[in-house]
Every structure is written in structure tokens, then in C-alpha cells.
Amino acid sequence: MPSRIARTQWSGGLNDGSGQVELVSSGVGTFDVSFPRRAADTAGGVTSPEELIAAAHTACYCMELSAVIGEVGGTVHSLVAEAVVGLGPDPAGGLRLTGIALTVRGQVEGLDGSGFAKAAQTAKETCPVSKALTGVEITLDAALA
């Protein structure tokens, strides 16, 4: 399986510096990052590690959920997933991810609400990004749309 590459260039200190994250493998873009925007209530047009984790998690999760649904005989018409990744103080010092609230709504043939919820839970447990984030509490709200 291939590897993917992202690169960040940073200049300055934590509070007065800034950087850019480049998605090297895909070449789809370069995005500004800064700690003050990361720690603020509004992003102000600047991304953050938490937003990038949320994006990675939802993309991976939808792929995994579509595979799980297919394995149990269902057909996916649409999946919409959202991840809210929290950032807060770490009791040991510094910052930490405080949790991930994963929500998914699906339009699926061949599964009832209970079957969809079971598939969604299985996908949460088997998604490679979920596995990588085992140190963070991940909650799941799954329902048919």
C-alpha cells in the first residue's frame, strides 16, 4: 500500500509564528496554520491539526462504513459523516485532544436502523484512522437519514 506525504513549513514562535501545511502527495493545496487561530473559537480562514484530523477521520470512516455495509448485503446511496475534534488542556501539561464526536447519517438499502447502527459501530472500531486515535475518546451518533 502507498504512503502519503504532507509537509509543514513554520516560521516564528508559537504565538507570533505561522506556517503552511502542504498536501504533497495529492498536490491539492497548501493551507495556512497558526497557533492563535488554532486556539481561538473561530478559525478565521486558517486550518488546524484538529480540523485536518477531523477531515481524515470522516473520509476514512465513510470508506470503512461503505465496506462494512457492503459486506452485510446493504447498498450505500449516501453517507454524510462529521467529526468534531476537541482541543483542551492536558492535566499533565500542554494541550491534548479532548474527544471526537463522530456523527453519520446514511441513505442505505437493505439495512434497518438497527443494522445501520451496528455497521456504523463496526466501522468506528475498524477504521484505520479510528485505530490510530485510540488514545482519544470517540463517540458515535449513527442513524439512517
Image (cartoon, rainbow, N blue to C red):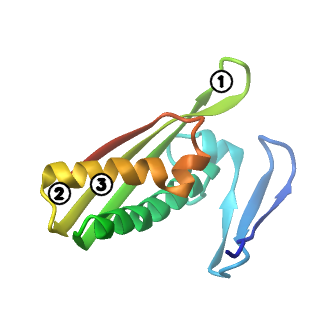
**What amino acid is found at the position of numbered circle 2 in the picture?**
Leu
**What amino acid is found at the position of numbered circle 3 in the picture?**
Ala
Which of the pair 75/142 is nearer the observer?
75
**Left or right position of 99 against 5:** left
Q: Earlier in the sequence, mark 3 or mark 2?
A: 3
* Above or below 6: residue 48: above
Residue at 58%, 44% in the rendered image = 133
Disc 2 to disc 1, C-alpha distance: 36 Å
Disc nearest the viewer among 3 and 2: 3
Q: Dot 1: within a 10 Å radius of its alpha carbon, few (fewer than 14), some, or many (20 or more) residues?
A: few
Q: Dot 2: within a 10 Å radius of its alpha carbon, few (fewer than 14), some, or many (20 or more) residues?
A: some
Disc 3 to disc 2, C-alpha distance: 11 Å
Q: Position of residue 10 (x, y in %)?
A: 83, 57
Residue 68 — which label? none
Q: Position of residue 81 (x, y in %)?
A: 35, 58
**What amino acid is found at the position of numbered circle 1 in the picture?**
Asp
- Which residue in the protein does label 2 denote? 144
- Which residue in the protein does label 3 denote? 119
